[in-house]
Image: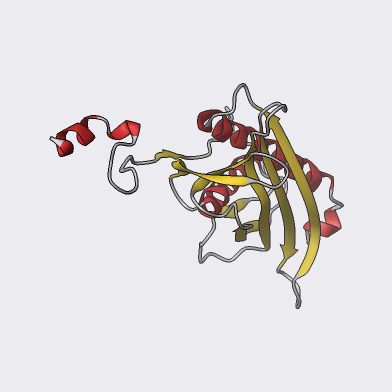
Amino acid sequence: MLLAACTAVTVAGCSIGRPMMEPTRYLIDLPSESAKQAARFEETLRIGNVRVAAPFGRKTLVYRLDDVRYISDPYNAFAADPREILGSRIAEWLQHAGPFNAVAPLGSARPGDYILEVIASELYGDFREGRPAAAVLAIDFALIDQRGARPTVTYQRSMEQRVSLAEASADELVRGYGIALTNALSQLVTDLDKQPAKNIER
């Protein structure tokens, strides 16, 4: 009888030990464009290291509750390592939006004229009481020219994106991450388009 009763109310947490509920899995989606942008540079790009700082590098979603408290949500998580998700989405976006001729994804063995290094230092939902809920993404980009005798950093920038959410929920948070990453990548492409030709092209 006890087993039957607990099976019937598993969602309510009636179990001995930890609840058995599987977490909901999420991927970050970026808005698709209608047509691929023409590449401005002949050079190729490879996505290099993508790092997500602790404690935001685990699969579980992270919420900020006050000035010092952050919690991980065991029932809502990314479907893969967040660094892999970010690396994949960044490669897809830059392959579509340019300005490089081709973009090799994270983990690819293909060489690139340039390497893009990425660090996400913040990735959490700001759910502090008395404040509007928001998705927070702080990300650093460094573009490294591999063509010379020694690698040279030709572009480096830190960006912080804060996207307001309709409510403090996991669904809204992951949608907010998509908007935040899109905004950051749009700024990256704009910056690269403004780079002097000598800093990018041979």
Residue 197, how many percent across, how many down?
84, 53
User: In the rendered image, is residue 163 in sight?
Assistant: yes
Residue 68, how many percent across, how many down?
70, 47
Is residue 23 or residue 152 the one in the foreground? 23
Residue farthest to the left, as pictured: 1
Instruction: Name the residue rendered at 60%, 55% in the picture.
Output: 55
Classify residue 161 by image quadrant.
top right
Is residue 12 or residue 27 the one in the foreground? 12
Instruction: Name the residue rendered at 54%, 58% in the picture.
Output: 106
Is residue 83 or residue 127 the one in the foreground? 127
Instruction: Name the residue rendered at 49%, 50% in the picture.
Output: 59
Compared with 132, 61 (above or below) is: below
Q: Is residue 109 left or right of residue 199?
A: left
Q: Is residue 180 left or right of residue 82?
A: right
Classify residue 152 by image quadrant.
bottom right
Classify residue 36 by image quadrant.
top right
Residue 64, how many percent across, how many down?
64, 41
Placement of the N terminus among the 4 image quadrants: top left
Total residue callouts? 0
Placement of the C terminus among the 4 image quadrants: bottom right
Instruction: Name the residue rendered at 77%, 46% in the picture.
Output: 159
Q: Is residue 146 left or right of residue 175?
A: right
Residue farthest to the top, as pictured: 166
Is residue 174 or residue 33 the one in the foreground? 174
User: In the rendered image, is residue 31 in sight?
Assistant: no
Q: Is residue 137 left or right of residue 110?
A: right
